[in-house]
């Protein structure tokens, strides 16, 4: 685990943003956070496998529940810096509480039980500005050799008004993540897909840390 010095500012900004957004998050985000289920289906793990997962920026716990349902023997950790998002995640994952553990804080600054076999970022990294590279670097050091990094997030948009709208929601959409991930894990696979006929593109990345 390495330190990321930009924690407090980001934490204040996103915690404030999610104070209200957490209340409408699950009711609204299904209509534009595409690719989350597909990413989980593409992970190279057997359903019965015993392994350790971390989701960074787990939010309200949608992926944590899907992971817990899919991988019955996995131990699953989620970290998020918003108390409001975690309150919802805690309720949603209560039925899996023996296997799902939640941590609050800025990834890279909270002690976690690394190493992990799988680390997921789902619509988290485009919100970490500045500092997204640091989070990927921390994940690479928190992963076991041979462990899997899975990412799904916005890629870019040709629509300037939409880009400005998303910037107002703290999201940066200029195709910056996929090339960096590909540099960090050259054998990883990045897939870029259109949303709503190309109003924006999102991407999925699955890569194996060299063992
Ligand atoms: C758009 S939500 C995504 C939630 C969930 N992963 C999903 O796919 O629905 C982004 C989440 O990342 C969290 N987050 C952003 N930066 C973070 C950081 N540095 N450490 C921990 N959580 C972070 C935010 O608080 C927010 O809950």
Image (tube, rainbow, N blue to C red):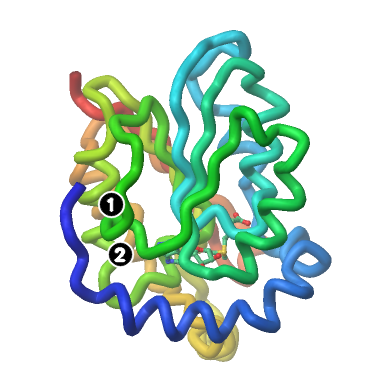
Q: Which residue is mark 1?
A: 136
For the residues labelled 2 and 1, the Cα–Cα distance comes to 7 Å
Q: Is residue 192 visible?
A: no
Mark 1 vs ligand 1: CB under 8 Å?
no
Checking the image for residue 132, the label placed there is 2
Q: Residue at x 64, y 81 (%)?
A: 19
Q: Nearer the viewer, residue 178 or 144?
A: 144
Quadrant in the picture for residue 74: top right
Q: Residue at x 49, y 79 (%)?
A: 14
Quadrant position of the C terminus in the picture:
top left
36 sits to left or right of 2? right
Q: Secondary structure at mark 1?
A: helix
- Disc 2 to disc 1: CB gap under 8 Å: yes
Please tell me whether residue 77 is drawn above or below residue 25 in the rendered image.
Answer: above
Please tell me whether residue 200 is drawn above or below residue 130 in the rendered image.
Answer: above
Q: Secondary structure at mark 2?
A: helix
Q: Residue 125: horizontal and vertical position, in percent?
A: 41, 62
Quadrant in the picture for residue 180: bottom left
Please tell me whether residue 42 is drawn above or below residue 46 in the rendered image.
Answer: below
Q: Residue 171: horizontal and vertical position, in percent?
A: 48, 76
């Amino acid at each position: 685990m390495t330190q990321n010095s930009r924690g407090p500012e980001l934490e204040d900004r996103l915690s404030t943003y999610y104070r209200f957004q957490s209340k409408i998050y699950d009711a609204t985000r299904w209509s534009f956070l595409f690719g989350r289920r597909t990413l989980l289906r593409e992970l190279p793990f057997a359903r019965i496998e015993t392994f350790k997962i971390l989701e960074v920026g787990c939010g309200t716990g949608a992926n944590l529940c899907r992971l817990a349902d899919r991988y019955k023997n996995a131990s699953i950790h989620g970290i998020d810096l918003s108390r409001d998002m975690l309150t919802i995640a805690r309720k949603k994952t209560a039925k899996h509480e023996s296997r799902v553990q939640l941590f609050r804080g800025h990834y890279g600054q909270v002690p976690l039980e690394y190493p992990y076999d799988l680390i997921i970022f789902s619509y988290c990294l485009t919100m970490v500005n500045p500092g997204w590279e640091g989070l990927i670097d921390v994940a690479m050091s928190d992963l076991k050799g041979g462990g899997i990094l899975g990412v799904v997030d916005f890629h870019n948009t040709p629509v300037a008004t939409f880009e400005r709208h998303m910037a107002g929601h703290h999201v940066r959409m200029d195709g910056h993540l996929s090339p960096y991930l590909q540099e960090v894990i050259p054998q990883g696979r990045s897939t870029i897909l259109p949303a709503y006929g190309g109003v924006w593109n999102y991407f999925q990345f699955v890569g194996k840390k060299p063992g």
